[in-house]
Image: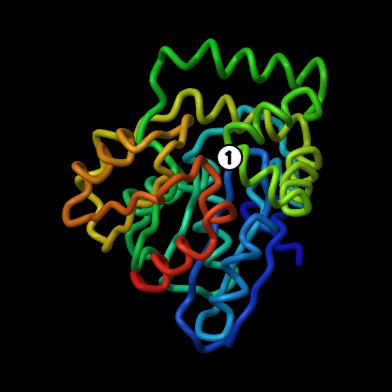
């Protein structure tokens, strides 16, 4: 359904009992709410599951830039208000994990528990040329110019070979991402840094990361664990970046155990 938040339309879906504890799922760059299908399948019987397309993604509006992670976090807070949700377990992967960190720092009243997956608390300035190169590639060649390289970072070669149908679903999700939305969110990631604020997070926090994630490796997850008091880290064996899909059973067990 389309919900007007802060003057813009966000697309969201809600599953599960109205009176159940709420879990909110926030996707990565170049994805959309469909990314969380493997989690909705196991959560919806006991949780009210809220998932949405971030601005510039999926069926949500693509407002003009520039974007910041702070703006996208305001979208989340506004969405929760519109839906009448007072507290939630927030689960974010990659860009969604960046949003989750800012939400827990700036809007702690909403965050009952926090799950941060394959994400970072800051973008190294040395990565700036890489992000600019990706943005230029997409601006000149569309999402198709970036899709195969993204899949190679997200899913292992074995998974892509053994699960071609699921790999195609991920490929199509990337290809459907609006070019302008991708570029503005990529620029927001390129200037992201919440590392000095993480000590303010008081919500119980689980951090999960793929063992071989090349984009946000375990060292980044360990840095977040060190900075968030009482947080714990779970490394997903053999996985790359999109752990909720590639290692869905392992991921779901870890998430359900934390809940």
Q: Quadrant of the C terminus?
A: bottom left
| Mark 1 residue crowding within 10 angstroms, few (<14) / some (14–19) / many (20+) | some
At 73% from the left edge and 31% from the top edge, which residue is drawn?
A: 147
> Where is residue 141, by image quadrant?
top right
Image position of 149 (left or right of 144): left
At 63% from the left edge and 32% from the top edge, which residue is drawn?
A: 152
Q: Quadrant of the N terminus?
A: bottom right
The colour scheme used to paint the residues is rainbow
Image position of 52 (left or right of 235): right
- Disc 1, SS: loop
The residue to which callout 1 is attached is: 156
> Where is residue 111, by image quadrant?
bottom left
The residue closer to the viewer here, 194 or 143, is: 143
At 57% from the left edge and 24% from the top edge, which residue is drawn?
A: 187
Image position of 142 (left or right of 39): right
User: Please, is residue 39 above or below residue 208 in the view?
Assistant: below
**Total residue callouts:** 1
The residue closer to the viewer here, 164 or 97, is: 164
Instruction: Give coordinates of residue 22: x percent, y percent.
Output: 48, 75
User: Please, is residue 65 above or below residue 8 in the view?
Assistant: above
User: Please, is residue 31 above or below residue 142 in the view?
Assistant: below
Instruction: Give coordinates of residue 115: x percent, y percent.
Output: 39, 57
The residue closer to the viewer here, 209 or 160, is: 160
């Amino acid at each position: 359904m389309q919900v007007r938040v802060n003057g813009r339309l966000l697309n969201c879906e809600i599953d599960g009992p109205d009176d159940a504890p709420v879990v909110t799922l926030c996707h990565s760059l170049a994805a959309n709410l469909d990314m969380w299908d493997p989690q909705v399948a196991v959560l919806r019987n006991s949780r009210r599951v809220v998932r949405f397309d971030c601005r510039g993604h999926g069926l949500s509006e693509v407002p003009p830039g520039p974007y910041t992670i702070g703006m996208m976090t305001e979208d989340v807070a506004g969405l929760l208000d519109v839906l009448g949700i007072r507290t939630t377990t927030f689960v974010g992967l990659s860009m969604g994990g960046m949003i989750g960190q800012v939400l827990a720092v700036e809007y702690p009243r909403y965050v009952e528990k926090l799950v941060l997956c394959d994400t970072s608390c800051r973008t190294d300035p040395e990565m700036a040329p890489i992000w600019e190169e990706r943005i230029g590639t997409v601006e000149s060649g569309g999402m198709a110019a970036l899709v195969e390289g993204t899949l190679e970072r997200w899913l292992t070669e074995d998974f892509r070979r053994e699960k071609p149908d699921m790999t195609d679903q991920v490929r199509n999700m990337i290809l459907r991402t609006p070019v302008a939305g991708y570029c503005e969110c990529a620029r927001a990631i390129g200037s992201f840094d919440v590392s000095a604020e993480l000590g303010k997070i008081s919500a119980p926090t689980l951090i999960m990361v793929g063992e071989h994630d090349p984009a946000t490796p375990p060292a980044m997850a360990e840095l977040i664990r060190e900075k968030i008091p009482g947080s714990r880290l779970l490394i997903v064996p053999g996985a790359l970046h999109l752990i909720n899909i590639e290692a869905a059973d392992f991921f779901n067990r870890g998430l359900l155990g934390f809940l």
